[in-house]
Amino acid sequence: MTYAAPLYAPTRPDARAPALRVNLYSDTQTRPSPAMKQAMLEAEVGDEQHGDDPTVHALCDRMAALLGKEAAMFLPSGTMCNEIAILTHCRRGDEVIAHETAHIIAAEGGAPGALAGVSVLGLPGARGQFDVDTLRAAFRERRRNCPPQTLVEIEQTANLGGGTVWPLDRLGAVCEAAHVGGMAVHMDGARLMNAVVAAGVTAAEMAAGCDTVWLDFTKGLGAPLGAVLCGSAAFIDAAWQWKQRLGGSLRQAGICAAACLYALDHNIDRLAEDHANAAALARGLAQLPGIVVEAPETNLVFFTTEGAGVTADELAARVRRQSVQISTMGRFRARACTHLDVDRDGIALAVAAVRDALGA
Ligand SMILES: *Cc1c(COP(=O)(O)O)cnc(C)c1O
C-alpha cells in the first residue's frame, strides 16, 4: 500500500506543465525572502536543547508575551505543537473534543491515536466551529466505562471551515464550559495572526481562555520552518519531556528562530493584504457560472465546482496548465490560499485561468 502526497500535490512537476506563476495551493508555499534569509545568516546561535540559544530565547519570550502566557517552546512544526500539547494534557484512553473537520483529525496521520493513545470526538457545526450547546451536549458522565474527556481543541482560524474566525464571545463561552467541565482548552493557532488581523483584537485576547496555544510561522508568515507553543510555565516544563522524546529538541535552532522573529516584525500587518486579495479572488470566482464561493473571512478561499459540471481535481489540473495552482479538499471542493508571494495581478490571472478552464 502506498500513500499519495497530501492534497492535490503532483509528486513531481509535470514536465509539460508551464512554469508556475500563481501558487494558491497553500500559504505553506511561501519562500523565505532575501531579507529574512539575511536575518537567519546573522542569527546568534547556541545549543537549543541545552537552553543556550539566545535567538530561540528571544523568540519564546516574545511569543509568550504576544499570546499572554507564562512560557513558550520552539518546535519545528505545528503538527508537533498539537501532538506535544495532546501528549502533555492527556493520558492514554482520554478523549479529546474537536470540530469534526479539525486538522488533528484529518491531517496529522492519526497521531492523536498513534502517539498519545487518545480518541478524538468530532463535533458538527457550520464553517469549522461548534457552539457551546453542542459542546455541552457532548460531555460524558464521569463513569469508569466512559473515556475521560480532558481536552477541548479549537482551530483559529478554522482551516477546513473556510479560514473562519472564531468570534471572541463564542470562544469565551466554549472555554468556560470546558473548564467548568474539568477540561483544558488547546488552541491550534496555525493561522492565529490571520484571525487577529481580520478581527482587530489582540492575540492575547483571543488566546485568553485557552490553556495552551501555538502559532505557525510557515503559513502566511513566510518562515521556512518553526512554530511556537505557549502555556503555563508548569505546562511547558512538562512538555519539554515530550519534545525530547519525539526528537523535537534542537541544536542551533536560532537560525530558524531568527526567521520567525523577522516574520513577527515584518509579516503580520501585511496579512491584511492577503485578506483583501482573498476577497478579490472570491468576488472574481463568484461571477463564474456554476462556481459557489464560501465567503472568505481571512486568506483561504473555498469554492465548489459541482454546479460547473467539473470535479475539483479536474479544475485544478486545467488551471495548472495555465500556470496557476490550487488545491482540492473533496470531490467538488477546491481551495485557493492567498499569501505574501501572491499579488493582485496574480489574483486576476487566477480568476482568468478558472474562467478559461470552465470555457466561460
Ligand atoms: C498547517 C496546519 C497545521 C500543521 O502545521 P505544520 O507546521 O504544517 O505541521 C495544524 N493545524 C492547522 C489548522 C494547519 O493549517
Image (cartoon, helix red, strand yellow):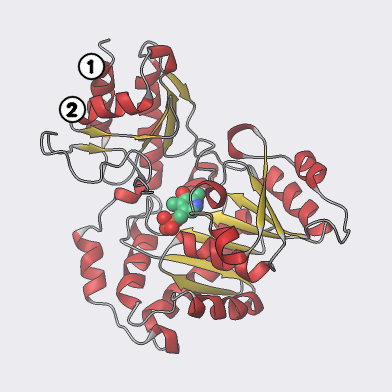
Mark 2 and mark 1: Cα distance apart in space: 9 Å
- Position of residue 359 relative to residue 350, above or below, is above
Residue 292 is labelled as none
Secondary element under disc 1, as helix, strand or loop, is helix
Question: Which amino acid type is marked by label 1?
Answer: Asp
Residue at image location 51% in from the left, 64% down from the top = 81
Q: Which mark is residue 322?
A: 2
Pick the residue in front: 139 or 164: 139
| Neighbours of disc 1 within 10 Å: few (<14), some (14-19), many (20+) | few
Q: Which residue is mark 1?
A: 356
Picture residue at 36% right of the left edge, 41% below the top: 273
Q: Quadrant of the C terminus?
A: top left
Q: Quadrant of residue 101?
A: top right
Q: Label 1 near label 2: C-beta < 8 Å?
A: yes
- Label 2 crowd (10 A; few <14 / some 14-19 / many >=20): many
At which x and y percent is residue 134? Answer: 76, 39
In the rendered view, tell whether residue 234 sits above or below residue 37.
below
The quarter of the picture where residue 158 lies is top right
Q: Residue furthest front?
A: 1
Check disc 2 and report its element: helix, strand or loop: loop
Residue occupying the point 79% across, 39% down: 133
Q: Is any part of residue 93 visible from this angle?
A: yes
Where residue 130 appears, as percent x and y from the top left, is 68, 40
